[in-house]
Image: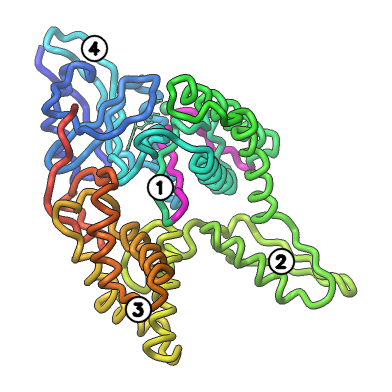
Amino acid sequence: MPQREKLNVQSPVYASALLRLPWSRPLAQWGADLLAALPRGISRHTVRLVRSEGLVLAVKEIGAHAAWHEYRTLRRLRRLDVPCVEPVAVIAQRRDADGEELTPCLVTEHLRYSLPYRDVFSRELDADTVSKLVRALAVLLVRLHLLNFYWGDVSLSNTLFRRDADQFSAYLVDAETGEFHEPLSRGRRLQDVELARVNIIGELMDLQAGGLLDPGVDVIALGTTVEGIYADLWELVVGELEVEGDAFDAVAERVGRINELGFDVGEAEIEQEGDVTHVRFEPAVFSTGFHRRKLKALTGLDVQDRQAQRLLGEMEAYRAVRYGGRLPLADVAHRWMVKEYEPVVSLVPEPLWGKLEPAQIFHEILDHRWFLTEQKGGFVPLARAAESYFRAVLPGRPDEEVVYLPRRRDAGGLKPDGGARDET
Ligand SMILES: Nc1ncnc2c1ncn2[C@@H]1O[C@H](COP(=O)(O)OP(=O)(O)O)[C@@H](O)[C@H]1O
Ligand SMILES: [Mg+2]
């Protein structure tokens, strides 16, 4: 019987990469030459990370109904600016050489620089890192709930993490059980939080059993922190603020804390009752990545939110020192890019190109400069700090770059051409 698979592709950019893949063979039998040696988390279905035409794709064998549901859900989440993986295609009507039906596949684009939680540290995770991961997951959950999205399978395994300055940002990877509910009830939200708690505890117990997490860590207590973190975040973002007297500082402080989390504030409803002011922020107008969008508008760089915050801080300092704060930030941004950011990033020695995202390297160089300044007791120029960092720090870091995608050069990465590592 002639082959007649059906490829539904989101964008023709991916078509040739997809056509080169051996859809008439079960995914588990795909050759090692196709596989990208990148860390992959635990999964129920067969999932493989494959390379084709310079792209890295994640392929998951899953029933047709579920594949379509997940594909559409991810598309909708992407349109809402949610940090999640990008859906590429559903491959249906697969048959093998004997005409036997094969399971359909959902294809997503591999999320660059992402790490499954088990791979965030090369040897053992510590309690501090785990709590950063839990916090990042809680922020993601708040973001999803603000958009009326019920995840239904919240766990560390269904999340990917990217380094974001000294924290992590979380991306949704598995949307199979997710649904939009308009409106999303409190009961549903708390159901997600409870699922998160139970799953995180199970996953941490697993890590301990495998010797990947210090046995002294109280995993039940640590997993349970997700509840409190979520509740605090939710209250901060949607809770009513009540201030006696002059409300200006309190409102500015609240907005600052919300921005810190990467959320934006569009509108506020303010009611005055005698000396007391009630302020309510409209959840519908919150969106993601306050600093990220600001940096992107100023420079075209698209990086993680805390990285963006750090770069904006550095840009402000540059503006104060060079121009006495007189020029508007928009005018300074270009000069700062050309004179500070780009020269440093372009100095990354070639053998170290695969280590970390450029914006993360820049962030670490700023930390390193601080460390050198403390040590030497005097000002250390950025170029000197960069050189010392490239020599003493970066070579010790594991490779986290995935692959260079030649067609999709983003402004955040002055990236060389190169391939993924081979499967080991
Ligand atoms: N687009 C992607 N980018 C990076 N990793 C991915 C991607 N898609 C899947 N993975 C990896 O594969 C794992 C399993 O994917 P998932 O969708 O959770 O499968 P399952 O539905 O079987 O649980 C994830 O934890 C992640 O590590
Ligand atoms: Mg999963």
Q: Are marks 2 and 1 in contact (CB under 8 Å)?
A: no
Residue lying at 44% horizontally and 59% vertically, measured from the top left: 305
Label 4 or label 1, whichever comes before in sequence order: 1
On whether ligand 1 comes within 8 Å of the CB at mark 3, the answer is no
Q: Which of the two discs, 3 and 2, sits closer to the camera?
A: 3
Q: Amino acid at mark 1?
A: Arg
Q: Which of the two discs, 3 and 4, sits closer to the camera?
A: 3
Per the model, the C-alpha gap separating discs 4 and 2 is 57 Å
| Mark carried by residue 269 | 2
Q: Position of residue 374 (x, y in %)?
A: 43, 69
Q: Position of residue 268 (x, y in %)?
A: 67, 66
Q: Residue furthest front?
A: 376
Q: Which of the two discs, 4 and 2, sits closer to the camera?
A: 2
| Mark carried by residue 55 | none
Q: Quadrant of ligand 2?
A: top left
Q: Are marks 3 and 4 in contact (CB under 8 Å)?
A: no
From the viewer's side, name the closer residue of 94 and 216: 216
Residue lying at 36% horizontally and 83% vertically, measured from the top left: 332
Check disc 4 and report the residue beneath it.
101
Per the model, the C-alpha gap separating discs 3 and 1 is 28 Å
Q: Callout 3: 10 Å neighbours few (<14), some, many (20+)?
A: many
Q: Amino acid at mark 2?
A: Glu
Q: Are marks 4 and 2 in contact (CB under 8 Å)?
A: no
Under tag 3, what secondary structure? helix
In magenta stretch: residue 170:
yes
Check disc 3 and report the residue beneath it.
333
Check disc 1 and report the residue beneath it.
78
Q: Callout 4: 10 Å neighbours few (<14), some, many (20+)?
A: some
Under tag 1, what secondary structure? helix
Label 3 or label 1, whichever comes before in sequence order: 1
State the image quarter where residue 61 is shown. Answer: top left
Q: Magenta stretch?
A: 166-183
